[in-house]
Image (cartoon, rainbow, N blue to C red):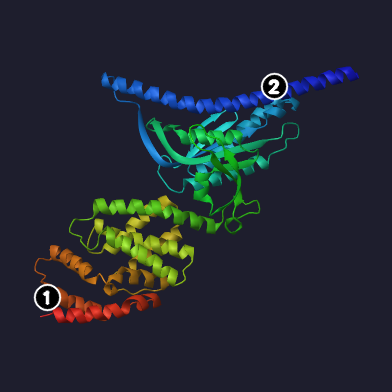
Amino acid sequence: MESGSKQQLLKRIASLVSENKDLKEKQRALAEAYSRLAGEVDEYRERIEKAKAEQGAGKPSYRQTRFDTATILYAGIQGLSDVVTATNTSEYMDKLDEFVLRFNDVVEKYGLVKLHSIGDSFICAGGIPEKNITNPITVTLAALEMLHIVETDLQNSDGPVWGLNIGIHTGTVTALVSGRKQSTYDLKGDTVNVASRIGSVGKENAVVISATTYELVKELFVCRYSGVLPVKYRNKLDLFTVTGIKPGFSADTNRYLPNDDFRTQLMLVQFGDLQEHVLDRLEKGLPKYLYYHNVKHTVDVVTESELIGWAEGLNDRQLLLLKTAALFHDTGHVVSYAGHEECSADIARETLPKYKYTPEEIDRICRIIMATKLPPQPGDLLEAIICDSDLDYLGRTDFVPVSNALYAELKAQNKSLSLNDWNKQQLKFIGSHQYFTKTGRKLREVKKQEQIERIKQLIE
């Protein structure tokens, strides 16, 4: 080929590369515009459906839900600028489809919801449809795994070099949910737009998160400050780049796979969701006459179990099992007063698999629950701690009002129980009671002896 022809060909290739770069920027702008327009379309759709309902045309085909804490992931697959040098553009499209399919697997793995897949843009969300507080962490994990998928497939033998821009932001969203058997979700709100903006201006082969998301994940991931993002109608937004999972929580040298310690930390965060679920069930299901075995008692036992557990030197995994057992130990009261411990264990076995507790962990939790059955006979330290926590009030300064609440509860079920008989029962029970942990004895034993002397004076 003559030199003039070569130069013309090179100029043509350079021109095509430039044009594709321009198209790439336009595509990013279109993706942002799409997110904004989607919100407007949802509003119009809502108005139309409302009008149909008012005219008697039938019920709306959607439902609207607000999520206060959802995390949006916007991923842009990079490679368009190199397509002009590929010998077979169909291979490029096949590879793009492969990435999207593998990203779908990651979304399913971490319990996220895929929102859109438009060209080389991929959008998903955590924290919907089930509200949870772990979604900033799980979305960041998913982002690192997506980046790893692309990085391990950067070079094709005869094709473009691939890259991935990922932007993540956490905030409030409104979801329009359509469909009955298989729901689809259209999200609107500033959170979606900000995530898209971060992803569109982010660095190639990087996971960039907003300051909001950073505050929620910084304990588990290595993050470095990467600058600010001008955001319309608000102040500048600080951005951070996630370079991987922190070394102590990573299962691989690439620092994108979590280890068992990471899982424990994630489940300790998830405990907030589990606690909300259980306490809500207790509030709705406990009989009204349970003045002692109520929500406050459960919260007291969970708190005291954690405090004694720290003092006794438990590790994070042991604390997780102990707190979970404390949370469930009285749930059986929604079924039966007698034998409520067995019912509590049954409820734990029914509930905990949904929160990804293993069968071995559930068995251990149920044994801890059963240790609270009177008379307490703990077999190990965790069982000893929950027994001391369950009867912690015996050595507390608020013994009198708590004891009165328990008397009122028993009186509601046994009308013939006199106050004098109750005091005799208390004296017998407290006199034979012992705290099993060093911490329990140190904190409560002295005060408990004072309560014994006080009750003796009350008995006729």
Mark 2 Cα-neighbour bin, 10 Å: few <14, some 14–19, many ≥20: few
Vertically, is 240 above or below 303? above
Q: Nearer the viewer, residue 154 or 205?
A: 205
Q: Position of residue 265 (x, y in %)?
A: 49, 57
| Amino acid type indicated by mark 2 | Glu
Q: Quadrant of the C terminus?
A: bottom left
Dot 1 amino acid type: Asn
Find residue 358 and report its horizontal and vertical position in percent.
Answer: 46, 57
Label 1 residue SS: helix
Q: Residue at x 34, y 59 (%)?
A: 328
Quadrant of the rendered structure where residue 302 is?
Answer: bottom left
- Residue 420, disc: 1
The answer to whether residue 391 is visible is no
In the rendered image, the residue lying farthest to the right is: 2
61 displayed left or right of 233:
left
Q: Is residue 73 above or below residue 10?
A: below
The mark found on residue 231 in the picture is none
Please identify, in this view, whether the residue under mark 1 or under mark 2 is nearer the observer.
Answer: 2
Which residue was labeled with disc 2?
Answer: 19
Task: Name the residue rendered at 72%, 32% in the picture.
Answer: 160
Task: Tell me if residue 276 can be seen.
Answer: yes
Choose top left, top right, bottom left or bottom right for residue 330.
Answer: bottom left
Disc 1 to disc 2, C-alpha distance: 92 Å
Image quarter in which the N terminus is found: top right
Q: Nearer the viewer, residue 273 or 18?
A: 18
The x and y percentages for residue 64 are: 36, 32
Residue 397 against residue 354 in the figure, above or below: below
